Structures are given as C-alpha cells and as structure tokens.
Image (cartoon, rainbow, N blue to C red):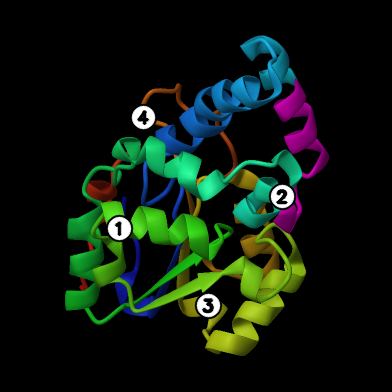
C-alpha cells in the first residue's frame, strides 16, 4: 500500500478497532455486561442482552453511546470496574507499536482521535504500549460531538490547526471515515478486520488495512 509520505505531516488514529483489537469491546458489551446485568436484575442472559442492545441502539451516534459514566448511571453498574474484570482481553492490533515508532522516526505527528472517554482510555493505556508512542491524545468528549459529526472535525481543526491536505486518518468505522473525508482529510483508510475473532468487514469505498505492516512509512 503506497502513500506519498512526503506529503503527510499528521497521522490521526482511532483507538478501538484500529490501534487496538475490537474483540475486547465486543466481548464486554455483548457477553460480559449482559451476564453481570442479568445477575443484578435477576434476568436470564438472553433477556438482559436484548434489553441492553435496545438501549445501546437508542444512543448510537451520540456521545452517550461511548460514555462509561452515562452507562454506569443508566444501568446502575460500575462500568469501568466491570471492564477491568476482562482487561486481559485488551490487545494491540498486529504491528501497531512498530508503525507508531516508525512514524515518530519520520517526524510525523501521531495523534490519537477517539470517541472513547478517559475512563476507557486509562484502562486500555494501562494494558498496552500505545500511549508512549503518541504525541497527542484527543477524546471527542472534549468537544461535545462524536467523530461521526462534522462539528467534531471543525473543533479538532481549531484545536490542532492541522492541514487536511497533509493528513492521514485511519478508523475502522465507515461512518467516521466518511465524516473525515467530507471535512476534507485527503488520506482516509479503514480497517479490514477490527475484531480479530470476527469476520472481514463488508467492502466500502475506503481501502482497508489488514495489518499495519502494509503501510511502509518513509519520506521517499
């Protein structure tokens, strides 16, 4: 996969499903949380899962959908504590560390741009090495809009003053990738298999990485 690295100064990177394996998040929300929710409210697991999926779907596309604080209050559960119960499932995707180091060697600005809140980030930073190889960390909760919304991108540009024409953005969400492209980010890539235990994503208009080794970082 060839990119004109000499014309890229800034690399914006999603976290869950991009730098990190989405298996942890999928397992937590679809398996572990329903089990714990069923225990608390004396429900069978299938009923608990259906209830949770319905409530999650109602908030999809909003910041609440990504907020551990919101769901802790909404479900009367300590979501960060429950996430720590399965933290051993948190893993970096293949070749992520080398990719971030190579970007640093080539003096590319490495910025994490995530919809995760700080509770989720703290848990994942404690279990991985990505934090030490990033130059800046941005959560959409700082701006009041998730990455799917164009308002997020205007706020991000005001904060970072990055040049969209000289920026690469990588995200596993097609909706987010489209928002970045519509804002004017010149180079936008997707992820072929965000969850290592899941299937390949359906083809989209974005070239999808399977492994970060596909990106040969150089200035030549």
Crowd tier of the residue under label 2, counting other residues whose Cα lies within 10 Å: few below 14, some 14–19, many 20 or above: few
Numbered circle sitting on residue 196: 4
Point out residue 207 in the picture as x, y percentages from the top left corner. Answer: 47, 45
Closer to the chain start, of discs 4 and 2, is 2
Closer to the chain start, of discs 3 and 1, is 1
- Asked if 88 appears above or below 5 in the picture, the reply is above
Q: CA distance from mark 2 to mark 1?
A: 24 Å
Closer to the chain start, of discs 1 and 4, is 1
Left or right: residue 40 versus residue 163 is right
Q: What residue did someone put label 2 on?
A: 73
Q: What residue did someone put label 3 on?
A: 165
Q: Main secondary structure of the magenta part?
A: helix
Q: What residue did someone put label 1 on?
A: 126
- Asked if 41 appears above or below 82 in the picture, the reply is above
Residue 141 in magenta stretch? no
* Between marks 3 and 1 in the image, the one whose residue lies nearer the viewer: 1
Q: CA distance from mark 3 to mark 1?
A: 34 Å
Crowd tier of the residue under label 1, counting other residues whose Cα lies within 10 Å: few below 14, some 14–19, many 20 or above: few
Q: Magenta residues?
A: 51-64
Point out residue 130 in the picture as x, y percentages from the top left corner. Answer: 29, 61
- Asked if 187 appears above or below 123 in the picture, the reply is below
- Asked if 110 appears above or below 74 in the picture, the reply is below
- The residue located at (31%, 78%) in the rendering is 108
Q: CA distance from mark 1 to mark 4?
A: 21 Å
Which residue is at the front of the view, 27 or 184? 27
Residue 192 in sight = no
């Amino acid at each position: 996969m060839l990119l004109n690295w000499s014309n890229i100064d800034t690399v914006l990177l999603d976290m869950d499903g991009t730098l990190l394996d989405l298996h942890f998040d999928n397992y937590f929300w679809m398996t572990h949380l329903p089990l714990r929710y069923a225990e608390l409210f004396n429900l069978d697991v299938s009923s608990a899962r259906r209830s949770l999926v319905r409530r999650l779907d109602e908030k999809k596309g909003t910041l609440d959908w990504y907020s551990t604080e919101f769901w802790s209050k909404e479900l009367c559960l300590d979501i960060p504590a429950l996430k720590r119960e399965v933290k051993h499932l948190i893993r970096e995707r293949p070749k992520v560390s080398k990719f971030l180091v190579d970007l640093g060697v080539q003096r590319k600005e490495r910025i994490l741009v995530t919809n995760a809140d700080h509770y989720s980030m703290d848990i994942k930073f404690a279990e991985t090495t990505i934090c030490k190889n990033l130059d800046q960390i941005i959560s959409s909760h700082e701006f009041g809009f998730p990455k799917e919304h164009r308002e997020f991108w205007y706020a991000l540009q005001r904060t970072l003053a990055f040049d969209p024409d000289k920026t690469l953005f990588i995200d596993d969400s097609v909706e987010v990738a489209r928002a970045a492209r519509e804002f004017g980010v010149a180079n936008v890539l997707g992820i072929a298999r965000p969850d290592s235990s899941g299937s390949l994503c359906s083809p989209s208009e974005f070239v999808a990485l399977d492994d970060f080794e596909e990106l040969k970082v150089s200035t030549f």
